[in-house]
Image: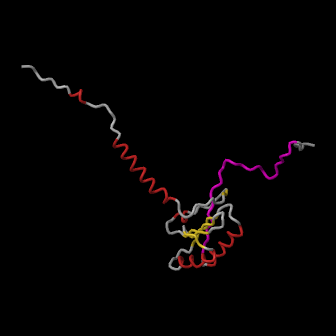
Amino acid sequence: MALAKRNEGANVSSDINVTPMVDVMLVLLIIFMVVTPMLQHGVPVDMAKVNNPTDMHDADKEDALLVAVTRDDHVFFGTDPVKVDELTDKIKDKLANRTDKRVFLKADMRAKFGWVVEVVDNVRAAGVDQLGLLTDQKKSGAIAPPTGATTNPSAPKGGQ
């Protein structure tokens, strides 16, 4: 009678099973697709760029009142388009049952100044305590020359 020899190493598969990894990646993709649209609050505009913007974290809250002015003279209250003469009434309705009477304004940097001033006047007429003007941080790569610098290469340098 011969001894039965077991060869367990011959049945081991060295292929990589990528199915669990694909499942996890698809779940992450779906999560990011659902969450990404919720990150932007209000209407997207190209806000003015300044060196030292004031940090206004309250504008990112879900219940913050945002007014946006686009470059083509459209006004939005939250994400709803609104006419300027109706803006005061809509803000009054929202502020009626709130203790925090703050409104944030996002104006496109190419919007007409007079139009933005008219929107600000209508927001102030609604009884707003504080009006926050939202801006973006200017990129630090561009450095402006000093105001007294000359750019003429033939200009005399120092001395007499």
Q: Is residue 19 above or below residue 30?
A: above
> Magenta includes 144?
yes
Scheme of image coloration: secondary structure
Picture layout, residue 149 above or below residue 131? above
Q: Look at the image and tell me in which quarter the N terminus lies.
A: top left
- The residue located at (82%, 49%) in the rendering is 149
Principal SS element in the magenta part?
Answer: loop
Q: Residue at x 65, y 54 (%)?
A: 138
Q: Position of residue 81 (x, y in %)?
A: 57, 70
Q: Position of residue 3 (x, y in %)?
A: 10, 21
Using the rendered view, name the quadrant where residue 5 is placed: top left
Residue 1 higher or lower than 58, as above or below: above
Quadrant for the C terminus, please. Answer: top right
State the residue in front, 125 or 11. Answer: 11
Residue 17 coordinates in the image, percent (x, y): 33, 38
Tell me what residue is drawn at x 67 percent, y 61 percent.
Answer: 109
Q: Which residues are magenta?
A: 129-153
State the residue lying farthest toward the right: 160
Q: Residue furthest left?
A: 1
**140 or 49, which is in the foreground?**
49
Left or right: 16 with respect to 68? left
Image check: 142 left or right of 97? Answer: right
Quick check: 21 left or right of 108?
left
Q: Does 51 sit above or below residue 7? A: below
State yes or no: residue 15 in magenta: no
